Image (cartoon, rainbow, N blue to C red):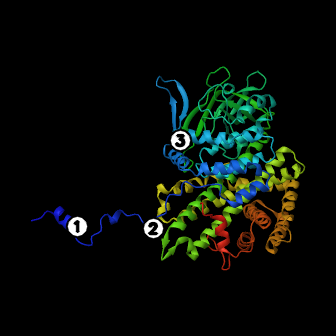
């Protein structure tokens, strides 16, 4: 009697039998990489419009690098091999070090070298801050975690300038394009990274309730700190800006990890946070106990001193949300271009075209607003002709953008993931990592309520902010009746703004601002679809509910060029 194995072989060799059919791969999208992350019309048009056209070649080169197979692998490895805390060495000495996978260092080295940290502050070319933001929009296609220390380093420079003698020492190093990991005397390194420690467990965003105490040492400007911070990201940075209670009130301090004499400053890392996303980056709880710190700005003016840092990091939250939207849209479009169902490519199926076009509108609006905010920041810090007006616009529009664009990120990413179906739900696709990342940007630098209330605070205390916002709207007056009606409604409702309705008001401000920018700068098909849906309510409650008659072809051809 023939064995079962022999029986199977007999039938496998029978006429008409097909070998290995269960392992043939069909109807699956090929790898996206390599691709050009800068192949984005809205991005490149905004780069030129906001005064940084001179950086186009660099941004395109960076986009090619970001979409390369090697760099995409670095991003995956940095998240798979998470940072590890080492509190003591083998002999029992306290070291408080965090070890990262080499892929993290590769990403950091490239980001710093490409000017995504503090370098724009040392660049006299108009548009340098816009160029950095555009670079962040394409480099954001890699890994979001390492964007945290580069963002904080960028943001620390203007805050540190409140203490000129400290800025003279540290600013040239914070604006360097050299990345050198490891703890050494800051002044002896070719480049530095900066972090910040503001929140504490009893208060969170209510930083005025901080209990970390700052005691003067008797040496001018030098204090010792005692307390426990709740969220301090990237603890392996070289220096930190920290809020603490001095005799004169809440104040800002510079805390180096290594003191000028080479000894370790007391910076006890109690634990690393086990987070939803942002897994490649270490977020920690440091304890200060006799920690040496230098006062930055006057005593009692800590929030005012560090607020410029917050403005910069809020811009980066908008930037990273827009980058994440674009990245996941590219992934969804690539899948739809190569996957077939029910006799046609997904990209040619009417309802999928609706979904992708709706996502494309959201992505372009986010990118366009991001670059407009970067342009305002660049012109404001340079004190250009309309610097005051741009500063007022930046003040309110950054808070508005931070609230809305980061809020849209999670829903957008979930929809993009769904375009891949089950293929998007598995870790190998990368989409779950992006989905876990999306909520962070809404939480970091003030959650939704904090930013919405900050908009009301700006309107109430700084009347020039409302004037600047409506001056921006005036640039598109008469171009679209739906937009004009939205502006008129806002003008009326601002007079009776209240905390209860702050979210709804700020949402309308954001949509009106995005519509104004698209009406002025985007193709008519994009602007018309955005105004019809986001302003005139010809829309459902989820993505993919654009009305019949939308010019899907033009929107998709612009958003999904063949190279991506």
Q: Can residue 422 be seen in this view?
A: yes
Q: Which of marks 1 and 3 is in front?
A: 1
> Where is 274 relative to 536, above or below?
above
Residue at 77% x, 45% y: name it.
128
Q: Quadrant of the C terminus?
A: bottom right
Q: Considering the numbered disc 3 on the image, is that residue within a helix, a strand or a loop?
A: helix
> Could you tell me if the residues under marks 3 and 2 are in contact, i.e. CB atoms within 8 Å?
no
> Circle 3 is placed at which residue position?
103
Residue at position x 74%, y 73% in the image:
528
Q: Is mark 2 on a helix, strand or loop?
A: loop
- Is the residue 546 above or below the residue 334 in the image? below
- The circle on residue 13 is 1
Residue 332 in the image, given as x and y percentages of width and height: 56, 63
Mark 1 in CB contact with mark 3 (< 8 angstroms):
no
Work out how far the residue at label 3 is from the one at label 2, CA to CA, in angstroms: 32 Å
Please state if 247 lies on the left or on the right of 362 as rendered: right
How many residues crowd around disc 2 within 10 Å: few (fewer than 14), some, or many (20 or more)? few
Q: 128 and 428: which one is in front?
A: 128
Q: What element carries label 1?
A: loop
Can residue 233 be seen here? no
| Mark 2, residue position | 27
The tag earlier along the polypeptide, 1 or 3, is 1
Could you tell me residue 338's position as x and y percent?
51, 66
Q: Where is residue 33 in the image (x, y as percent from the top left)?
A: 54, 55
Earlier sequence position, callout 3 versus callout 2: 2
């Amino acid at each position: 009697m023939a064995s079962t194995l022999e029986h199977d072989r007999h039938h496998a060799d029978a006429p008409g039998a097909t070998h290995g059919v269960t392992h043939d791969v069909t109807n699956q999208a090929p790898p996206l990489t390599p691709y050009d992350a800068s192949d984005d019309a809205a991005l490149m048009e905004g780069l030129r419009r906001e005064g940084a056209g001179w950086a186009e070649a660099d941004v395109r080169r960076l986009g090619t690098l970001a979409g390369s197979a090697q760099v995409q692998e670095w991003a995956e490895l940095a998240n798979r091999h998470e940072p590890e805390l080492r509190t003591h060495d083998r002999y029992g000495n306290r070291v408080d070090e965090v070890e990262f996978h080499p892929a993290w260092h590769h990403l950091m080295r490239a980001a710093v070298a490409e000017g995504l940290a503090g370098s724009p502050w040392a660049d006299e070319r108009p548009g340098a801050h816009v160029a950095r933001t555009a670079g962040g929009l394409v480099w954001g296609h890699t890994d979001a975690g390492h964007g945290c220390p580069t963002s904080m380093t960028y943001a620390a420079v203007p805050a540190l300038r409140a203490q000129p003698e400290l800025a003279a020492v540290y600013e040239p190093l914070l604006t360097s394009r050299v990345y050198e990991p490891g703890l050494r005397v800051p002044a002896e390194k070719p480049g530095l990274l900066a972090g910040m420690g503001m929140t504490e467990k009893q208060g969170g965003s209510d930083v005025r309730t901080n209990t970390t105490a700052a005691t003067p040492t008797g040496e001018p400007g030098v204090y010792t700190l005692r307390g426990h911070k709740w969220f301090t990201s990237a603890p392996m940075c070289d220096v930190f800006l920290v809020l603490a209670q001095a005799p004169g009130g809440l104040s800002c301090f510079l805390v180096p990890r290594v003191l000028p004499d080479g000894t370790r400053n007391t910076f006890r890392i109690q634990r690393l946070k086990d987070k939803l996303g942002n897994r490649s980056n270490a977020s920690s709880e440091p304890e200060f106990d006799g920690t040496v710190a230098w006062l930055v700005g006057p005593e009692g003016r800590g929030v005012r001193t560090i607020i410029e840092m917050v403005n910069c990091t809020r811009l980066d939250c908008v930037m990273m949300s827009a980058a994440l939207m674009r990245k996941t849209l590219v992934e969804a479009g690539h899948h739809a271009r190569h996957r077939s169902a029910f006799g046609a490519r997904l990209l040619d199926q009417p309802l999928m075209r609706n979904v992708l076009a709706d996502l494309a509108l959201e992505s372009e609006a986010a990118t366009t607003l991001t670059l407009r905010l970067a342009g305002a920041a660049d012109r404001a810090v340079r004190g250009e002709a309309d610097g005051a007006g741009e500063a007022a616009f930046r003040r309110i529009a950054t808070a508005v953008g931070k609230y809305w664009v980061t809020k849209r990120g999670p829903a957008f990413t979930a929809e993009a993931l769904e375009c891949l179906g089950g293929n998007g739900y598995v870790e190998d696709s990368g989409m779950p990592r992006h989905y876990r990342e999306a909520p962070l940007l809404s939480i970091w630098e003030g959650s939704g309520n904090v930013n919405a209330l900050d908009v009301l605070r700006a309107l109430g205390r700084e009347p020039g902010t409302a004037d600047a916002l409506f001056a921006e709207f005036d640039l598109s007056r008469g171009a679209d009746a739906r937009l004009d009606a939205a502006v008129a409604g806002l003008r009326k409702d601002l007079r009776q703004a209240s905390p209860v309705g702050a979210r709804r008001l700020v949402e309308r401000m954001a949509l009106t601002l995005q519509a104004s920018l698209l009406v002025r700068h985007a193709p008519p098909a994009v602007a018309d679809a955005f105004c019809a849906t986001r302003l005139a309510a010809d829309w459902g409650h989820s993505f993919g509910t654009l009305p019949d008659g939308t010019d899907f072809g033009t929107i998709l051809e612009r958003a999904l060029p063949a190279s991506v």
